[in-house]
Image (cartoon, rainbow, N blue to C red):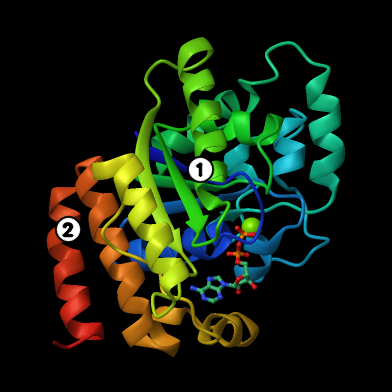
Amino acid sequence: MATTIAVLSQKGGTGKTTTVRTLADVLARIDIDVLAVDLDPQGNLSDYFDVPADATPTVADVLDGRVRAIDAVHDGVLPANLGLAESEVILGGKMGREMTLKRALREAKRRYDLILIDCPPSLGLLTVNALVAADYALLSTEAQYFSLQGVEQALELIELATESLHPDLEWLGVVLNIADLRTVHSREALQQLRERFDGKVFDAVIRQSIRYAESAERGVSIVDYRPELGADYLALADEVLERVGFDDERERLRALRSELVPA
Ligand SMILES: Nc1ncnc2c1ncn2[C@@H]1O[C@H](COP(=O)(O)OP(=O)(O)O)[C@@H](O)[C@H]1O
Ligand SMILES: [Mg+2]
C-alpha cells in the first residue's frame, strides 16, 4: 500500500507545489513508484508535469465520481484545473464529503509506492480531503514574520482531522521553504520554528533562489538545473524517507546524492 503524504500550508506561495514536484522527481529517480495528486484548482503541479490545462479527465472528475483515479493519471500526475473549484462546491453538499478523495484513491494506493498530494492555498474542504486520504501531513512554510501563525493554523486543522476523521494521521514535520538564511529575519524565523516545534522541523532548509523560477520556466528540475541547490531537496527527501521508514530507498538515495552533488 502506498504511503500517502499531503503537502499543505495555510496560504499560497510557501513552496508546496515545488516541494511536491521536486520530491516526486527525486523519489522517482530511486525507483519509487510515485503518484502526484494536484488538488489545487490553479493546476500549477499539472503544469510542471506538462499536462495541458484542458486535459481530461482530472481530479475533479474523480471527486465527482465519474472516473476512477487510476484512469485519470497522466504521466504520473492526477491533474487539476479550474474545474476543481466547482467540484469543491458540489462536494461540500455531499454526504461523506471529507472522505471522497480517500475512497477515490483506494485502488491507486495499491498500485503505487508513494502518493504525494499538493494542496490548494487554503485550509478548506480540499485540504481536509487530502488530510483524510493521507498517512502523513507535511507542512511547508516561508521564513516570514507571520509564518509561525500559519503553521499553528495548519496544525490546528491537522489536529481536528485527527480527532474527528482520521485518528491515524501523523504530522510528518514542517520544512522551512524559500528561505534566505543570509537575512537575520529568516534565521529568526527558523529559530522560532525550532523552539516551538523542536524535533518536527526538518534539518533540511530549502534555500531561496531565482534559479527555481528559471528552472520552472524551462521545465527542468532544479536537481538538474542547479544540483547545488537541488541538494536541499535531496536532503529533505532523505529525512522524509527516514520518517516514513523507507530504509532501502534511503540507501539508493545516498547513491543518487553522491552522483548529483559530489562532496
Ligand atoms: N526555493 C525557492 N526559491 C525561490 N523561489 C521559489 C522557491 N521554491 C519555489 N519558488 C517559487 O515561488 C513561487 C511559489 O512556489 P510554489 O511552489 O508554487 O508555492 P505554493 O504551491 O505553496 O503556492 C513559485 O513562483 C516558485 O517558482
Ligand atoms: Mg501550489
For the residues labelled 2 and 1, the Cα–Cα distance comes to: 28 Å
**Could you tell me which residue is drawn at 31 percent across and 50 percent down?**
194
Which mark, by number, is residue 236?
none
The amino acid marked with disc number 2 is Arg
Q: Secondary structure beneath disc 2?
A: helix
- Residue 211: percent from the left, percent from the top? 52, 87
Residue labelled with disc 1: 151
Give 131 or 29, whichever is nearer the viewer: 131
Q: Is residue 202 left or right of residue 150?
A: left
Mark earlier in primary sequence (2, 1): 1
**Could you tell me which residue is drawn at 29 percent across and 63 percent down?**
204
Give residue 189's quadrant in the image.
bottom left
Q: Is residue 12 left or right of residue 151?
A: right
Which mark, by number, is residue 250?
2
- Residue 5: percent from the left, percent from the top? 43, 42
Q: Is residue 67 left or right of residue 48?
A: right
The amino acid marked with disc number 1 is Val
- Residue 42: percent from the left, percent from the top? 76, 57
